[in-house]
Amino acid sequence: MAEKKIVLSRIGKAPVAVPKGVTVTINGVDVAVKGPKGTLNRVFSGVTFEQSDAQIVVHADSHTKKGKALHGLGRSLLANMVTGVSTGYKRELDVKGVGFRIDQSGNDLVFQVGFSHTVTYTLPAGVKAKVEGQTHLVLESTDKELIGQSAASIRAIRPPEPYKGKGIRYSDEVVRRKAGKSGGKK
């Protein structure tokens, strides 16, 4: 009987390129990535790393289903860390609605989005925000996971509704609109 060929993660097999100006320090499962935009640290599980000239290859510890999943995940997380410290991540949100606006005071964002009260959101450490024109918000960070969670938390304050499109949305988000009530009886 022929041996079964072990198929590893296609994503995990691709090496992670390390650009100039970025240093990756691997200490067992602890990985520190330092670049012009900052420093990121993460503890990995289920993978080992092999570093050569300007690239890092990720290897799975086991060939089980979970090991293959951690292989691809570990490679993606490392690639996101390298991209974050070299170029950074940006997420943009828009506020739509009459009287809806954003104000920034220090590390807090104050939203007026149709409630009887204002909603204050405190930015986590590592995320910078810039309010443009009281309705456009730009978030910047080196950590992709942190900026994505922050943007999702801000959007959850008042998600866009389908009838008038009011609420907080991502700048590249398309809100599917619904028709309202029909005018007369049939």
Image: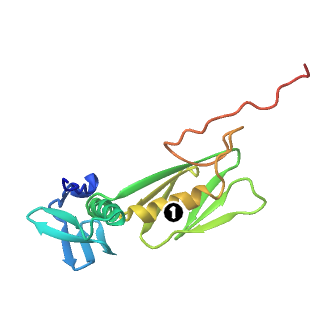
Amino acid type shown at disc 1: Ser
- Which residue does the image show at 15% across and 69% down from the upper left? 50
Neighbourhood count class around disc 1 (C-alpha, 10 Å): few under 14, some 14–19, many 20 upward: some
- Which residue does the image show at 21% across and 64% down from the upper left? 58
Comparing 66 with 99, the one in front is 66
Instruction: Classify residue 143 by image quadrant.
Output: bottom left
- Which residue does the image show at 27% across and 78% down from the upper left? 29
Comparing 130 with 80, the one in front is 80
Percent position (x, y) of residue 56?
A: 17, 64
Percent position (x, y) of residue 21?
A: 16, 64
Quadrant of the frame with the C terminus: top right
Percent position (x, y) of residue 157?
A: 64, 59
Comparing 52 with 39, the one in front is 52
Comparing 129 with 32, the one in front is 32
32 vs 184: above or below: below
Extreme residue in the front direction: 1
Quadrant of the frame with the N terminus: bottom left
Extreme residue in the right direction: 185
Extreme residue in the left direction: 53
- Report helix, strand or loop for mark 1: helix
In the image, 148: left or right of 80? right
Instruction: Classify residue 97 by image quadrant.
Output: top right
Instruction: Classify residue 126 by image quadrant.
Output: bottom left
In the image, 134: left or right of 22? right
170 vs 20: above or below: above
- Which residue does the image show at 75% across and 57% down from the upper left? 115
159 vs 42: above or below: above
Circle 1 residue: 150
Percent position (x, y) of residue 175?
A: 60, 39
Q: How is the image coloured?
A: rainbow
Q: How many marks on residues?
A: 1
